[in-house]
Image (tube, rainbow, N blue to C red):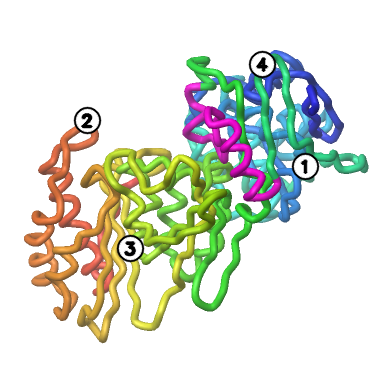
């Protein structure tokens, strides 16, 4: 058992004794005196704390932007991180110089995070277009100088190399680190993960932490025991076959977004709106599904596409069930206490298949859904021969619209069919009222999303909510 956490910081190896449940933001600012990384919201929303992370054992050569405020020290052990101090190796990087020259620098809180988000983009794309730049900045919410000068600086900047390990030997990953009353365990196999979960039933099972770590960042809780999923290679696998995407539970949404973009561009667009690049780079598919939120964006699309989920326990082994059967009630699932989510199977498209997913929220980026609709239709010409339709935000769980599906079967995909669908939808859902929307509003939106699908398929102009 180690008492120190070792990682690479701005190209140099660092070993530090600190509780594994310490946030990386607190480690950088309070322990290592790297004050360039700022604390803004401490919830993963504002981007002031953005750093670049290259995970231990990562297949990709470039780092990903991530929020240091909701990342724990346990998650960076044996990895490489870069802060704003390391971008230019003691001098301004080309991006920093461009931002200073054209007046796009803002206050000291927001500018470092913007620099890091854009540096991550430039590390993987030497000539990003404007859409890529806006996506990279979606998690950096302050715009004191306006978008234009920031985007212009990003367009003009040269791709800058990110500091690596400077030729040092790769740091060996410890399987357990314990300090000051907090212990982090890093199993490398599913069996070891299940054993650790059995032996430490009160431990936090930590994947990306984009949800779990918010109260930790706010000092509302601490974690005496942590079991991490990211070192289990089987949970990090994403395999594409002729029939399906086989998705490990610890695969991130950023990774899945790029994998499905060609087959399901509408799903990829939905994933892009889950959260910023910083959130997508850490948040996992298994974590999003496992929280069983009725307004989670992943499950409606995956249910509509016919996804299955695989669970595993030590005593009973694996079992696979349709994802729609995983959700039992509000925040209640089919998963037993001794089980974990191992992965998912997502079918690839078939000829004649039409898939669209639409998210309605008060803000285009970085916002929780009011209603999310996913529509998977099998068409013979314009006639619906099969349908799987699911919604989030309309019930206590993500749920299929079975009456709506029956109402459109065998009918042409037109406005009359959309009206019939809207009538049937009242038999499927009795939505709630909260501060995001009334029950009446939610029902009107849910009906309207199918009408939008019909218009979209017909090539009619569909007005989209402005960012």
Answer whether residue 130 is visible to the viewer in this image. Answer: no
Left or right of residue 307: residue 72 = right
The residue furthest bottom is 381
Left or right of residue 253: residue 451 = left
Q: Is residue 211 magenta?
A: yes
What crowding class fits label 4: few (fewer than 14 Cα within 10 Å), some (14-19), or many (20 or more)?
Answer: few
What crowding class fits label 2: few (fewer than 14 Cα within 10 Å), some (14-19), or many (20 or more)?
Answer: few
Residue ID at (59%, 44%): 194
From the image, state whether disc 1 or disc 2 is nearer to you.
2
Mark 2 and mark 3 in contact? Answer it, CB < 8 Å. Answer: no
Q: Tell which circle, 2 or 3, labels the residue nearer the N-terminal end.
A: 3
Left or right of residue 249: residue 23 = right
Q: Tell which circle, 3 or 4, labels the residue nearer the N-terminal end.
A: 4
Q: Position of residue 252 (x, y in %)?
A: 56, 49
* Residues at marks 4 and 2, CA–CA distance in whole angstroms: 40 Å
Q: Quadrant of the N terminus?
A: top right
Q: Which mark is residue 426?
A: none
Mark 1 and mark 4 in contact? Answer it, CB < 8 Å. Answer: no
* Residues at marks 3 and 1, CA–CA distance in whole angstroms: 40 Å
SS for dot 4: loop
Residue ID at (61%, 35%): 227
SS for dot 1: loop
Magenta region: 188-215
Q: In terms of image quadrants, where is residue 365?
A: top left
Q: Which residue is mark 2?
A: 435
Q: Which residue is mark 4?
A: 181
SS for dot 2: loop
Q: Which residue is mark 3?
A: 304
Q: Position of residue 186 (x, y in %)?
A: 69, 38
């Amino acid at each position: 058992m180690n008492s120190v956490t070792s990682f690479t910081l701005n190209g140099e190896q660092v070993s530090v004794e600190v509780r594994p449940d310490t946030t990386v933001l607190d480690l950088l600012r309070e322990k290592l005196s790297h004050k360039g990384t700022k604390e803004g919201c401490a919830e993963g929303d504002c981007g002031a704390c953005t750093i670049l992370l290259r995970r231990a054992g990562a297949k990709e050569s470039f780092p990903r932007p991530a929020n240091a405020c909701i990342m724990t020290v346990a998650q960076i052990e044996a990895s490489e991180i870069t802060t704003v101090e390391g971008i230019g190796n003691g001098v301004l990087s080309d991006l920093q110089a461009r931002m200073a020259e054209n007046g796009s620098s803002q206050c000291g809180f927001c500018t470092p995070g913007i620099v890091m988000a854009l540096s991550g983009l430039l590390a993987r794309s030497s000539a990003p277009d404007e859409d890529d730049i806006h996506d990279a900045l979606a998690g950096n919410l302050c715009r004191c100088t306006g978008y234009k000068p920031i985007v212009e600086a990003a367009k003009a900047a040269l791709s800058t190399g990110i500091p690596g390990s400077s030729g040092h030997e790769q740091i060996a990953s410890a399987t357990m680190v314990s300090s000051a009353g907090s212990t982090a365990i890093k199993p490398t196999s599913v069996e070891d993960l299940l054993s650790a979960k059995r032996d430490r039933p009160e431990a936090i099972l930590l994947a990306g932490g984009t949800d779990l770590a918010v109260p930790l960042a706010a000092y509302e809780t601490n974690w005496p025991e942590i079991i991490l999923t990211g070192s289990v290679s089987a949970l990090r696998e994403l395999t594409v076959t002729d029939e399906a995407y086989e998705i490990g539970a610890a695969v991130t949404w950023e990774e899945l977004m790029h994998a499905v973009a060609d087959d399901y561009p509408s799903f990829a667009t939905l994933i892009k709106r889950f959260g910023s690049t910083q959130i997508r780079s850490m948040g996992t598919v298994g974590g999003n599904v496992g929280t069983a939120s009725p307004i989670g964006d992943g499950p409606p699309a995956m249910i509509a596409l016919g996804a299955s989920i695989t669970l595993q326990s030590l005593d009973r082994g694996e079992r696979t069930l349709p994802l729609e059967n995983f959700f039992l009630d509000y925040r209640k699932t089919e998963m037993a206490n001794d089980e974990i989510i191992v992965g998912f199977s997502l079918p690839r498209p078939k000829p004649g298949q039409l898939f669209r997913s639409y998210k309605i929220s008060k803000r285009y980026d970085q916002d929780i859904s009011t209603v999310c609709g996913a529509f998977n239709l099998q068409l013979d010409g314009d006639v619906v021969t099969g349908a799987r339709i699911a919604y989030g935000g309309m019930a206590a769980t993500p749920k299929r619209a079975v009456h709506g599906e029956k109402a459109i079967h065998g009918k042409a995909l037109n406005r009359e069919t959309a009206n019939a669908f809207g009538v049937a939808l009242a038999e499927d859902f009795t939505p709630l009222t909260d501060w995001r929307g009334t029950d009446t509003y939610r029902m009107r939106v849910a009906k309207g999303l199918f009408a939008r699908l019909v218009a979209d398929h017909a090539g009619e102009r569909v007005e989209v909510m402005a960012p």
